[in-house]
Amino acid sequence: MGGEYISEWTVGSQLGWMGLNGQMLTKGTILKIEKERLLQHNLFYPDKNEVMAIITYELFEQDGQTAVTIQEDFINPITAQEKSNSEEGWKAALTMVKELFEKK
């Protein structure tokens, strides 16, 4: 699942994952940014204007290296298919987040 995050990277701006075909696959809004430490955004259901989850990325130092924790808090219980889709999406998303945080 190739693509890229699209955003202005400011609190309140839209955030989305655009696939290689140019289609926006996810949408949300940036809720918090702390430079080099934290990014939090919500994620909307693909077919509704309703928040599905809040996602928080936190960076910290561990043994002289930068580590990241990610927490995805779903607003409502999810189905097995939604869980599977989420897990698959994280593989591609984590690569992009790593590249974003490492840009100088």
Image (cartoon, grey):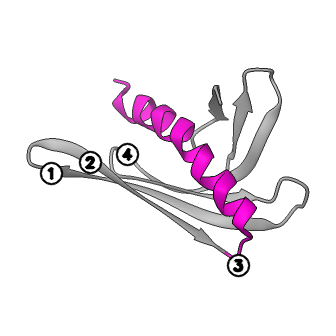
Identify which residue, 54 or 94, lies in the foreground: 94
State which mark lies toward you, 3 or 4: 3
Specify whether 13 is left or right of 96.
right
Residue under numbered circle 2: 67
Badge 1 or badge 2: first in the primary sequence: 1
Decide: marks 1, 4 in contact (CB < 8 A)? no
The residue at which mark 4 appears reads as 35
Q: Is residue 91 magenta?
A: yes
Q: Name the residue at 63% across, 54% down.
A: 86
Q: Quadrant of the N terminus?
A: top right
For marks 3 and 2, the one nearer the N-term is 2
Q: Amino acid at mark 4?
A: Lys
Dot 1 amino acid type: Gln
Main SS type for the magenta part? helix
Which sits earlier in the primary sequence, circle 3 or circle 4? 4
Tell me the CA gap for discs 1 and 3: 33 Å
Residue depth check, mark 1 versus mark 4: number of the one nearer the observer: 1
In screen coordinates, is 68 left or right of 53? left
Secondary-structure class at tag 1: strand
Q: Earlier in the sequence, mark 2 or mark 4?
A: 4
Any magenta on residue 103?
A: yes
Q: Quadrant of the C terminus?
A: top left
* Residue 93: assigned label: none
Between the C-alphas of marks 3 and 2, the distance is: 29 Å
Q: Nearer the viewer, residue 56 or 81?
A: 81
Tell me the tag on residue 77.
3
Mark pair 1, 2: CA separation:
6 Å
Q: Amino acid at mark 3?
A: Pro
